Amino acid sequence: MSAAPLRLWLDDDRPIPDGYNAWARDAAAGIAELERALADGRHIDIVSFDHDIISADGQDFRPVMMWMAWNEHWPAVVRVHTGSSIGAEWLLGTARRNAPEGTRIMDARATSKGGGAQPLRWPV
């Protein structure tokens, strides 16, 4: 029996919505989830990004996006749910420039309709 696909929620403030099965509150934990999925041969369905880590001054989730780009290890869907306009533009731009063809990149900013901590309705 194969393990369930990874559906990773990256956010230190908003609680994990229905439909996700892993929650990382900082970049190191997010990278660890991806590395564990890679080692276990798990498919990665979605990674949903916040940007700023409120509890850690000056930290953000950019290292997770950089890890995916450097390792060429991408989910089927990259979703950006942050409320930070500058952070969203960086995350979306990096994904658009580096993700392989066929990767769905979703702008689901917390300030847009249907954005933020919404339940995941699969398939997205």
Image (cartoon, grey):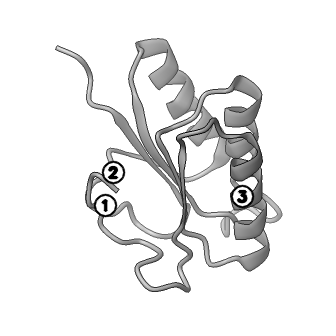
The residue carrying mark 2 is: 20
What secondary structure is found at the residue carrying circle 3? helix
What secondary structure is found at the residue carrying circle 1? loop
Of 51 and 55, nearer the camera is: 51
Task: Answer with mark 2 or mark 1, whichever residue precedes in sequence.
Answer: 2
The three-letter code of the residue at mark 1 reads Leu
| Horizontal relation, residue 16 to residue 24: left or right | left
x%, y% of residue 64?
A: 67, 42
The three-letter code of the residue at mark 3 reads Leu
| Vertical side of 26 occupied by 67: above or below | above
| Horizontal relation, residue 15 to residue 2: left or right | right
Q: Residues within 10 Å of mark 2 (few under 14, many from 20)?
A: many
The residue carrying mark 3 is: 91
The residue carrying mark 1 is: 120
Question: What is the C-alpha distance between the residues marked 2 and 1?
Answer: 7 Å
The three-letter code of the residue at mark 2 reads Tyr
